[in-house]
Amino acid sequence: MKNSSQNSRIRDATMRGRYVVAATVLALLNAGSVSGFTAPQPFAPHSVVNMGNHRSDDHPRSGCRHLMTATMSNEKKESKKADESRPNPIVVSAEAEALSHSETTIKLTPSFDLFQMLTEEEGGSIPVTRSGNALRDDTILKVGTPDTLEGLQLSDYVGLGGKTKIETLPDPFKMVDKELQPFSDSIKELVSTDQPILSMAAKHFFEKRHGKRFRPTIVQLMAKTVAAATPENLFDDENNAASHHADLPEWAWSGASEIEAEGGMTTSNHQGSEVWRKQGQLGQIVEMIHVASLIHDDVLDEADTRRGGEAVHKLYSNKVAVLAGDYLLARASVLLARLENTAVVQIMATALESLVAGEIMQLKSPPKTLLEMETYLRKSYYKTASLICYACRSTALLGGHAYGSTVATACEEFGFHLGLAYQIQDDILDFTAAANVLGKPALADMDLGLSTAPILYTAQEYSQLRPLVMRRFKEKGDKQTALEYLYKSDTAMDKARSLAQFHAQVRNDWLVFRNVFFYVLTHLVLCTSPTM
């Protein structure tokens, strides 16, 4: 039995290690000038930008904002008051963040402030327009391209209320299996080290427990998709996007890797190109970061199993596991720098910082906020969706598309909804699937004191459950009581599935990457095992 003080020291050391890596990469980026960017221009304080059928003031959000909580209060809360009551999970202070920026660095906005997180019925709305979401357009890239999936709904498929079989859609994993194979084979060599124990620990998930390679598959699918889109002409055409959004900072129109292929990148010359190689390497980097986070999380959570086998720290030791995770993050940072795109380095370093923010939010959220659906979704964004959506936007940049382009914006939005849908579905399976299917212990979230979508919806129905949620199920019998209420509810699990389906469906209605998005998310909601 491990000493509790020893466990506490290990948790602290692991969290510090992750934070230091993220902070160091971001600091190195800002040490000198970044030639890929030009000095940003300030936002016009009260400019109004048209966004399809939506109009939004470009200054920081004002007016009222709803928080969907387990108390189901109808009272409208002003955004300022709501923000003051909500925990701030960011691991650096505002002063430190300001010091780390220069005139040429990207000022990233969290994706949950760029794209819709909750349905309108639950208090959600489309966020205001800013540099990360200004070009959300479903027509600019559809010219001459037949949209074979327009009008289709997830509810058309068996398992979600319809009669169409999922097998009628292509398997997204098979769509890029051949392209992904060279990168899957070489990743084991990329993390090799002369230290035998460390090498075995670092390579464990890549050799024996590699899962379905979910994240590299998404990157590879996105790489194929952006190759089919011609980069937008942002400055030469009088009708270009930049001229309609002159209030956006100039760095929003930069960050694209230089494409040396004659005639630009197309679907015919993409595979085997330097662009393809770098995008494939980005998939490897994302998988390294993800696996490192799994190894560290298992130490923090004292988990025994992962992906159907023993956790790394159980096979070796806590010290070896922490070192193996740190080593993977170090290797990912080196490979990230070798992509030779400072914008991508900055975006992916922010993704790493977001993982730490999610862990802090999970550990330190005030009791009252544990009842809020928005708090749950923000934590899910930090811990799961951020890495996916930032990888998707980075894939577009490596493919020659500017940070603020329609293509790059659609990529991040794709990853945002995909990541949240995946996490919500994973949380549902925590209650409905056996441990041998999950690849980890069932009800693991409740064992850690965490309340996910099914429990939060149950607490909206049964007020007796709210004190248990707020005290993180610490008292004897709390978990059993919570489960009894959950299985007693006729609506909680359906509402959780509907929330996952919302994220799977919402952007299918007008997303430029409708085909890939629909294929991936339909398979995700119906077929995916969370061992990925």
Image (tube, rainbow, N blue to C red):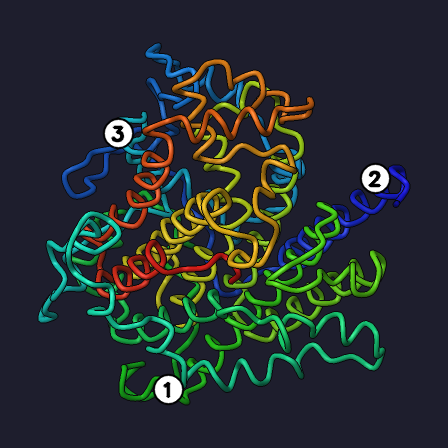
Disc 2 or 3, which lies upstream in sequence?
2
Question: Residue shown at 65%/66% (left/top)?
Answer: 333
Disc 2 or 1, which lies upstream in sequence?
2
Q: Residue 235 at what x, y percent from top left?
A: 26, 62
Disc 3 or 1, which lies upstream in sequence?
3
Q: Which residue is mark 3?
A: 120
Q: Residues within 10 Å of mark 1 (few under 14, many from 20)?
A: some
Q: Amino acid at mark 1?
A: Gln
Asked if the residue at tag 1 contacts the one at tag 2, i.e. Cβ–Cβ closer than 8 Å, the answer is: no
Q: Can residue 400 be seen at all in this image of the molecule?
A: no
User: Which residue is nearer to you in this view: 424 or 403?
Assistant: 424
Q: Residues within 10 Å of mark 3 (few under 14, many from 20)?
A: few
Disc 2 from disc 1: Cα separation: 48 Å
- Label of residue 8 in the image: 2
Q: Residues within 10 Å of mark 2 (few under 14, many from 20)?
A: few
Task: Name the element at disc 2.
Answer: helix
Q: Can residue 101 be seen at all in this image of the molecule?
A: yes
Asked if the residue at tag 1 contacts the one at tag 3, i.e. Cβ–Cβ closer than 8 Å, the answer is: no
> In the rendered view, would you say 444 is above or below 59?
below
Front label number (3 vs 1): 3
> Would residue 176 be found to the left or right of residue 298 on screen?
left
